[in-house]
Image (tube, grey):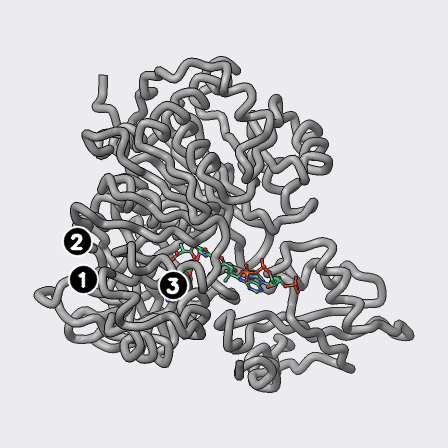
């Protein structure tokens, strides 16, 4: 028998001795003890066991954030199945693709969406559709209530899958990044040490729990340290600022920091107990970094990661390791092998020299097992010596600080969510009267970056730019919808006939740059 590698077993082992202590406190005053987390995850795990799911079955979840949704995640790990979280903003076509591709045996959705998610799931062969709402109701909890609250954690090997996270691609459809128990646990353990998690830490959890940042980095961090979480179902800058005096750790995408800076209550006094502010998922502007320092007396620690790899780099926590440098994402984390490679004319590549810009490639126990049912795509994204090509472009200075200077992948990061222009262009090009389109990212004072669409029409067709935006709103997750659309005579092209996106970006860069 191999050693038990189930991530849940490691998290459970870190629960404090006093199981009646508070594990999660919601912002509206509900208290959940460690015993509650243990018992509820056991009941849900027993429900899954009773369903006699196939080993390796996927459990797809598109629900509003709640502590019960957290318990569902823990139960999936505990029962040995594969968790597949889905952004609550996804609409019909997106959900149909994910469910069709992943073929989950269980789908859990909100009762408000069950009307359309249910038929999509059943048509794709899903055996069980349950509901879960953020007011502690739904068929999932009704059934789990009839199950025993004792459950032995299912044995897992290191390389067994724990989760699949869909991440869009530069071309084609989204790919499911397969993350193993080892990927997730190794990263959580490294971060626990690197960020100095300590007894008495309290985390304010204000991020969504369907992506790496909120689901893995934040939750695993707190649980692996037996730390209490102050839990907000939705980010509200006022509420976060109001809870700061009780907390020690906060994690957010840059937009969260920008919005909190607009709160007069954000003062040095409010942050007196705080130990660490962490930012990531998108570039933190240097102005935000400095404004935060000035207002709170704290230096934000910026780190960098991906769905495929969890966390890769971090600015130092302790002064002994070095200072936290704004504009950089710090050093490669312990165990992460990170290199910058420069492509050469003959098709080969070579290691970048100090400060030279190149493609970031990584290897380590945190690097995913490949894309779900896409062996060819997986092969393309790894080098011949086994490094994963991140698609990020960066440089390493003489001290080892890494700076991300751009991306080779055509990606817009808006408020911490990834938007792939190719996907949006595909939707726009299918609209009646559209000849072609180009979606580019432009600076945005709140979201960091947002999409703008530039569209040409078929001969004789008349289309309204606002109508395109309205059409997209009905079909796509709201954060993917371009904030503006322009109908033009033709798209600028270079000598090779390629659309000059840089030129479009330049033309529209001033649209949303100021608050
Ligand atoms: C909301 N809207 C957005 C975004 N969010 N537009 C562009 N980008 C966004 N991110 C728009 C909606 O379309 C809507 O417009 C209007 O804002 C209000 O929507 P609402 O949902 O009420 O917005 P909100 O609650 O204010 O949300 C903003 C937010 C949210 C709190 C910044 O986007 C958020 O939680 N972002 C965090 C994302 C995250 O966790 N990323 C981590 C990925 P309309 O009314 O016109 O429709 S993990 C990752 O990247 C890696 C691995 C890593 O390194 O961490
Ligand atoms: P995702 O596909 O959601 O996992 O997003 C991963 C991408 O987010 C990375 O490849 C980077 O381009 C970007 N990213 C994450 N953290 C940072 C950061 N601190 N600074 C700049 N980009 C980041």
Residue 345 in which image quadrant:
bottom left
Residue at the (30%, 32%) spot, across then down:
34
Q: How far apart are marks 2 and 3 (CA)?
A: 23 Å
Q: Is mark 3 on a helix, strand or loop?
A: helix
Q: Mark 3 points at which residue?
A: 241
* Residue 388, percent from left and from top: 35, 53
Residue 161 in which image quadrant:
top left
- Can I make out residue 116 in this image? yes
Q: Describe residue 436's horizontal placement relative to residue 25 as left or right.
A: right
For the residues bearing labels 2 and 3, Cβ distance under 8 angstroms = no
Which quadrant: the N terminus? top left
Mark 2, residues whose alpha carbon is within 10 Å: few (<14), some, or many (≥20)?
few
Of the pair 439 and 108, the residue shown nearer to us: 108
Mark 3, residues whose alpha carbon is within 10 Å: few (<14), some, or many (≥20)?
some
Farthest front residue?
29
Q: Mark 1 points at which residue?
A: 317
Residue at the (38%, 40%) spot, across then down:
179
Q: Name the residue under label 2.
A: 196
* Residue 50, percent from left and from top: 49, 13
* Residue 264, percent from left and from top: 41, 74
Q: Distance between the residues labelled 1 and 3?
A: 22 Å
Q: Describe residue 26's horizontal placement relative to residue 435 as left or right.
A: left
């Amino acid at each position: 028998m191999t050693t038990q590698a189930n991530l849940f077993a490691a998290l459970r082992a870190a629960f404090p001795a006093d199981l009646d202590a508070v594990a999660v406190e919601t912002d509206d005053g509900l208290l959940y003890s460690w015993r509650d987390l243990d018992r509820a995850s056991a009941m849900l795990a027993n429900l899954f066991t009773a369903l006699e799911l196939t080993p390796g079955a996927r459990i797809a979840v598109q629900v509003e954030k709640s502590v019960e949704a957290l318990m569902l995640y823990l139960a999936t790990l505990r029962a040995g199945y594969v968790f597949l979280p889905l952004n609550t903003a996804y609409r019909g076509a997106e959900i149909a693709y994910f469910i069709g591709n992943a073929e989950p045996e269980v789908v859990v959705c909100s009762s408000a969406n069950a009307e359309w998610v249910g038929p999509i799931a059943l048509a794709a062969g899903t055996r069980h559709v349950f509901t879960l709402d953020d007011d502690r109701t739904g068929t999932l909890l009704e059934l789990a209530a009839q199950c025993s609250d004792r459950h032995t954690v299912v044995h897992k090997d290191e390389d067994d899958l724990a989760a699949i996270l869909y991440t869009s691609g530069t071309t084609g459809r989204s790919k499911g990044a397969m993350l193993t128990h080892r990927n997730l646990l190794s990263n959580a353990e490294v971060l626990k040490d690197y960020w100095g998690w300590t007894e008495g830490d309290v985390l304010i959890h204000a991020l969504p729990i369907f992506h790496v940042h909120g689901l893995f980095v934040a939750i695993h961090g707190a649980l692996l340290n037996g730390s209490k979480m102050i839990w907000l179902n939705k980010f509200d800058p006022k509420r976060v600022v109001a809870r700061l005096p009780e907390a020690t750790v906060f994690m957010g995408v840059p937009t969260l920091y920008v919005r909190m800076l607009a709160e007069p209550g954000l003062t040095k006094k409010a942050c007196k107990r705080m130990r660490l502010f962490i930012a990531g998922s998108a570039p933190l502007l240097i102005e935000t970094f400095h404004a935060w320092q000035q207002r709170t007396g704290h230096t934000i620690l910026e780190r960098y990661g991906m769905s495929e790899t969890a966390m890769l780099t971090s600015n130092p926590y302790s002064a002994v390791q070095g200072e936290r440098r704004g504009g950089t994402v710090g050093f490669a984390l312990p165990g992460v092998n990170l290199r910058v490679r420069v492509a050469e004319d003959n098709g080969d590549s070579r290691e970048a020299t100090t400060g030279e810009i190149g493609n970031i490639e990584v290897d380590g126990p945190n690097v995913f097992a490949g894309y779900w049912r896409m062996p060819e795509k997986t092969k393309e994204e790894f080098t011949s010596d086994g490094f994963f090509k991140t698609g990020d472009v960066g440089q390493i200075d003489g001290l080892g600080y890494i700076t991300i200077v751009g991306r080779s992948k055509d990606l817009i990061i808006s408020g911490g969510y990834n938007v792939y222009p190719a996907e949006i262009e595909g939707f726009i090009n299918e609209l009646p009267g559209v000849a072609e389109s180009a979606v580019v990212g432009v600076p945005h004072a709140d979201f960091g970056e947002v999409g703008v669409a530039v569209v040409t029409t078929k001969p004789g067709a008349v289309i309204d730019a606002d109508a395109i935006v309205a059409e997209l709103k009905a079909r796509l997750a709201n954060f993917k919808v371009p904030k503006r659309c322009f109908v033009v005579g033709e798209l600028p092209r270079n000598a090779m006939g390629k659309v000059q996106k840089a030129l479009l970006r330049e033309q529209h860069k001033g649209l949303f740059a100021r608050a």
